[in-house]
Amino acid sequence: MVADDEFDWESLKAVAEEAMTHAYAPYSHFSVGAAATVEDGRVVSGCNVENAAYGVALCAECGLVSQLHITGGGRLTHFVCVNTDREIIMPCGRCRQLLYENGGPSLLLMTVSGVKRMDEVLPDAFGPDDLT
Ligand code: THU
């Protein structure tokens, strides 16, 4: 776990909670909201969007990453996601990969066990540097 900084995690979690209320999750009934800050101070968010073809469900992080790019790109610096009960949850394996791509190893995540760096949540990650 990394030392806590002055970052306002509660405000970012509130953005994730609001995003969660927009989830489309008629199959799992498990709504998820995700929120992140960008290095320039922007805040981006997303909610999960399920599909009758269960396997093509979009995680909340997918929408968040899309909003990141639509609004100008840049690096994510802080991230949190919550479930229907507004509890913090861990990003799934695939979404850890999405977050690594867009936040890099130093992205800070509020997790079920405190603030952690991306490279703790996805150690020895395959990433952009492997393709150079
Ligand atoms: N889900 C997310 O949105 N993000 C995650 O990181 C974990 C899982 C969604 C996908 C699906 O709609 C529901 O949670 C149940 O798995």
Image: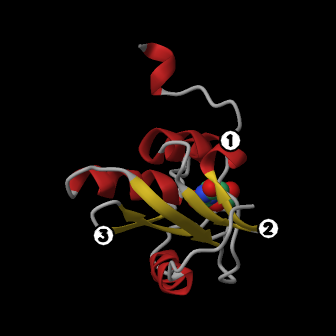
SS for callout 3: loop
Which residue lies at the image location 58% right of the left edge and 46% below the top edge?
95
Q: Is residue 112 above or below residue 51?
A: below
Which mark sits nearer the N-terminus, 1 or 2? Answer: 2
Residue 100 in picture, x, y percent from top left: 53, 42
Which mark sits nearer the N-terminus, 3 or 1? Answer: 3
Residue 101 in picture, x, y percent from top left: 46, 38
Amino acid type assigned to the residue bearing label 1 in the image: Leu
Please state if 122 lies on the left or on the right of 100 as rendered.
right
Which residue lies at the image location 20% right of the left edge and 53% below the top edge?
72
Report if the CB atoms under discs 1 and 2 are less than 8 Å apart.
no
Please state if 54 lies on the left or on the right of 38 as rendered.
right
Return the residue at label 2. Answer: 113
Residue 120 in picture, x, y percent from top left: 71, 47
Count the numbered circles shown.
3
Residue 11 in picture, x, y percent from top left: 48, 86
- Tell me the quadrant of ligand 1: bottom right
- Mark 3 residue's CB less than 8 Å from ligand 1: no
Q: Report how far apart the C-alphas of labels 3 and 1 lie in the structure.
A: 24 Å
Return the residue at label 1. Answer: 122
- Return the mark for residue 41: 3
Q: Quadrant of residue 43?
A: bottom left
Q: Quadrant of the C terminus?
A: top left
Q: Report how far apart the C-alphas of labels 1 and 2 lie in the structure.
A: 15 Å
SS for callout 1: loop
